[in-house]
Each structure stands twice: as structure tokens, then as C-alpha cells.
Amino acid sequence: MVRRAVCPGSFDPVTNGHIDIFARAADLFDEVIVGVGVNRSKSASSGRLFTAEERMEMLRQAVAPWPNIRVEGFSGLVTAFCEEAGAQAIVKGLRGSGDYDYELQMAQMNSHLTEVETVFLMTDPSMSFVSSSLVKEVASFGGDVTDFVPPHVHRQLLARLAERRTGDG
């Protein structure tokens, strides 16, 4: 039996902390699917900087070194996506107690809905304060976020923020 897990999220944008979790999940499972939430009702007006397609392409580039990781979009419940994909587990990274409190509640609901288990991986301490939202905010004010995102994501992030400043995005 293939051990398959899903790492779900919006990844707007993907950070090095996310990639660390994906890589560690790839060591634990035969296959890892990075599931990108593709909610058509959520647009740039709801805080999304990148489209689902852009996020998935950035993720594909980021996980290219791992042959057992693939990227797919999904809409609806992550548990339904897991069942469709034949995944036995959901892998979530935890940065601290706030993440744990939220993710525990989600894991308990998910276990009520399906047989899929939730596996928590602790974030590398050097990335415990990094989030996609914080990266976007710091970058939007000119702060240096090069240590927190892959180079290709950094380039796209700076380009998108420049577009928004000039009204082209």
C-alpha cells in the first residue's frame, strides 16, 4: 500500500518554512500531494496576491527536487480531496501553540468526517515566525524577505508588489 499524504494550504506565497515541511513529509510518506486551495470566490480583493495557477507553478518549481512530491489544486473540503487522492494523512506544520490550538480543532473535525489522520510536524525553529502573510507585509514595505522564500518566489513577489504600486496588477 502506498503511503500518501496531503499538505493543504493557500501558499500565497510558498515560504521556506512550507518547503521544509513538504521535504520532511516526503521522508515519511511514499507520496506527498501539496494541495492548493482553489476557492474561486476568493480573489485579490480578499487578500490573495497570486492566482491559484501562479501559486501552483511557484510550488512546482519549489518542490522539483523531490520526485515524490506533486502539486494539485482542490476546492471544497480537504478531507474530500484526500479521499479522492487516496491519501491516508493530512500533514500540517505547526509554528507554535496558536497554530496547535487552531489545527487541533480542524484535525478533530476532519477525523469526524473521514478516516484520514492528521500528522503535525513542528516547524524548524529558524522559520517559526514566518508566515505567507508576514512575508507579503514585510516585502510590501520594502523589507528584505530573501531568507524566507525561494529565489524564484522572491522575484515574483517583488514583481507583483511593484505592479500593485503602479496600478498594473
Image (cartoon, helix red, strand yellow):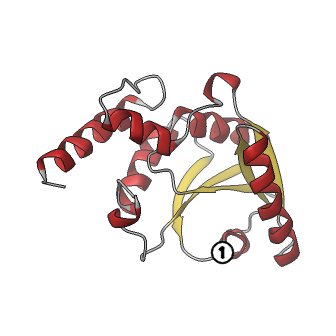
Image quadrant holding the C terminus, namely bottom left
Quarter where residue 165 is shown: top left
Q: Residues within 10 Å of mark 1 (few under 14, many from 20)?
A: few
User: In the rendered image, which residue does mark 1 sit on?
Assistant: 77
Where residue 19 appears, x then y in whole percent?
A: 57, 37
x 67%, y 69%: residue: 78
Task: Answer left or right for 134 relative to 126.
Answer: left
Where residue 151 appears, x then y in whole percent?
A: 37, 29
Q: Is residue 83 visible?
A: yes
Position of 28 relative to 49 (above/below): above
Q: Nearer the viewer, residue 111 or 30?
A: 111
For label 1, the SS is loop
x 59%, y 40%: residue: 18
x 42%, y 70%: residue: 42
Task: Answer left or right for 6 relative to 57.
Answer: right
Task: Answer left or right for 26 relative to 61.
Answer: right
Q: Nearer the viewer, residue 148 or 63?
A: 148
Image quadrant holding the N terminus, namely bottom right
Q: Tell me the amino acid under the disc marked 1.
A: Leu
